[in-house]
Image (cartoon, rainbow, N blue to C red):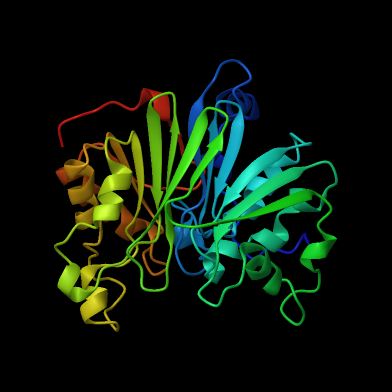
């Protein structure tokens, strides 16, 4: 069952050579702070020729910093990451969930390293509105009739930690801070800091029609002077006013993200969680528009890597 594929294959030319990835991500040669994108799509996997360049797997971002591996969200991109981690086992990692909509957890049952004894995964997430723990929320999707293999079959050491907005997780000299994002059903934003450098993962934030021009103050706090801001730009303002808007309409959701990046003095911004209806050619145009207003911004692509220590502050 683990060989089943819920998602599209990783484009072969999007991955760096294994030796390069080993040096840059695991920090074997020197302490590093690297970000790699394994799934960048929102809502549902979108395999196909029209999405091959940006990728069709749902959210999963890996951050390797000071010899530690942190993973954010467990969409179908987590399955692809798991294939690469098999070369490095035994492995220890910290897995953080923003929330448990299916796009964020659907790769977890297919995360092969979790089934291997000797591996260790620390798993963090907020308690659900119904009081369910992060363990219960992940377990529920693996119960029959939805899935044939229960969570209890995972033979790695799984350590579940329930967290809340405002939590501060300390992993030696790496800190992970959480805030509540502006989302009616709840979602966590994360700030990862090491040696004076920070990455912010704000991958599910929404606005109502009367809030389109407002900046979420919690997000502003989280993003202050970050080296990298990973921001959710899935939905355009038109979608809030016209849910039946055609897929080809231009998306302006990134505009508020640019406003945050400028106001918070962010060095680099990455637009993430692409709408499933937005194909590669459409996203190319969005990226050009974004860069016309903030030149150190880009759209996330599967396999893309960012060296946090090499980001530089620029005038937008």
Horizontal side of 142 relative to 195 (left or right) equals: right
Location of residue 273 in the rendering, given as x and y in whole percent from the top left corner: 41, 58
Please tell me which residue lies in front, 50 or 271: 271
Location of residue 124 in the rendering, given as x and y in whole percent from the top left corner: 59, 53
Query: Which residue sits at x=30%, y=37%?
Result: 268
Instruction: State the count of labels.
Output: 0
Q: Is residue 106 above or below residue 66?
A: below
Query: Which residue sits at x=35%, y=63%?
Result: 234
Horizontal side of 127 relative to 107 (left or right) equals: left
Please tell me which residue lies in front, 264 or 36: 264
Query: Which residue sits at x=61%, y=27%?
Result: 67
**Among the 4 quarters of the image, the one containing residue 17:** top right
**Among the 4 quarters of the image, the one containing residue 130:** bottom right
Location of residue 225 in the rendering, given as x and y in whole percent from the top left corner: 27, 35
Q: Quadrant of the N terminus?
A: bottom right
Q: Quadrant of the C terminus?
A: top left
Q: Is residue 257 visible?
A: yes
């Amino acid at each position: 069952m683990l060989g089943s594929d819920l998602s599209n294959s990783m484009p072969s030319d999007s991955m760096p050579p294994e030796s390069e990835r080993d040096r840059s991500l695991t920090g074997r040669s020197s302490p590093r702070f690297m970000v790699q994108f394994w799934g960048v799509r929102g809502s549902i996997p979108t395999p196909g020729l029209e999405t091959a360049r940006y990728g069709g797997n749902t959210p999963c971002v890996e951050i390797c910093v000071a010899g530690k591996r942190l993973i954010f969200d467990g969409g179908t991109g987590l399955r692809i990451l798991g294939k690469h981690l098999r070369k490095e086992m035994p492995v220890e990692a910290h897995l953080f969930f923003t929330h448990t909509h299916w796009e964020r957890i659907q790769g977890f049952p297919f995360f092969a390293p979790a089934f291997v004894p000797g591996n260790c995964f620390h798993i963090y997430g907020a308690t659900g509105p119904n009081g369910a723990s992060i363990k219960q929320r992940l377990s529920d999707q693996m119960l029959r009739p939805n899935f044939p293999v229960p969570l209890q079959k995972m033979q790695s050491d799984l350590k579940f930690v329930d967290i809340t907005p405002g939590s501060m997780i300390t992993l030696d000299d790496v800190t992970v801070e959480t805030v509540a994002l502006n989302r009616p059903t709840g979602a966590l934003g994360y700030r990862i800091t090491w040696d004076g450098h920070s990455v912010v993962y704000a991958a599910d934030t929404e606005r109502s029609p009367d809030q389109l021009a407002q900046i979420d103050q919690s997000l502003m706090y989280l993003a202050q002077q970050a080296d990298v801001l990973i921001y959710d730009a899935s939905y355009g303002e038109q979608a809030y006013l016209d849910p039946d808007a055609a897929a080809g309409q231009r998306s302006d959701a990134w505009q508020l993200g640019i406003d945050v990046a400028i106001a918070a003095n962010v060095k680099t911004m990455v637009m993430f969680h692409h709408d499933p209806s937005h194909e590669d050619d459409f996203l190319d145009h969005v990226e050009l528009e974004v860069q016309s207003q903030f030149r150190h911004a880009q759209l996330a692509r599967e396999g893309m890597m960012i060296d946090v220590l090499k980001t530089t502050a620029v005038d937008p």
